[in-house]
Amino acid sequence: MDFPEELKYSKEHVWVREEGDRAVIGLTDYAQDALGTISAIELPTVGDELEQEDSFGSLEARKTASELYAPISGTVLEVNEELDAAPEVINDDPYDGGWIAAVSLDDPEELKSLLSAEDYAEYVSQTDEDEE
């Protein structure tokens, strides 16, 4: 599993990359692997107001359907429209080509509630142990 050090992570398996006054969010490598091949995604709409921990979209995979939960609050500035036609890009490239949305970073303090790469790796290893 790959968990880039420069990103922050939520316990709902979404990553955040801070880019000045905005943040890019996507699904973690762990989550895409657990879900299997992603076949469809419901993206948020540009202009949507997200609240931290609220649902902002969903995806369908071979194994299940899953809600996406916002790791931070903000306004959706941009969505990755390429995912409409090719949602499996999330499986192939979860941290670059598979990004989901860019949002305004309304409250930078919320980033402090997210996990570091090291803490997220530990969290998912405990999750895996609990499932065994």
Image: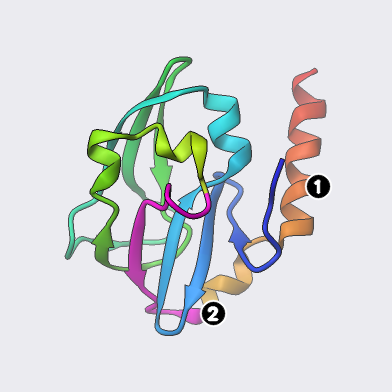
Type of amino acid at the residue the image marks with label 1? Glu
Q: Nearer the viewer, residue 22 or 85?
A: 85
The mark nearer the N terminus, 2 or 1, is 2
Residue visible at 45% across and 84% down? 20
Which corner quadrant holds the C terminus? top right
**Mark on residue 109?**
2
Task: Locate residue 74: give its quadrant.
Answer: bottom left
> What x and y, as percent, mark residue 127?
74, 33
Q: What's the residue at 45%, 39% (across, down)?
A: 90
Question: At which x and y percent is residue 119?
Answer: 77, 56
Q: Secondary structure at mark 2?
A: helix
Q: Which residues lie in the magenta part?
A: 95-108
Q: Which residue is mark 1?
A: 122
Q: Is residue 129 highlighted in magenta?
A: no
Q: CA distance from mark 2 to mark 1?
A: 23 Å
Q: Nearer the viewer, mark 2 or mark 1?
A: 1
Corner quadrant of residue 115 = bottom right
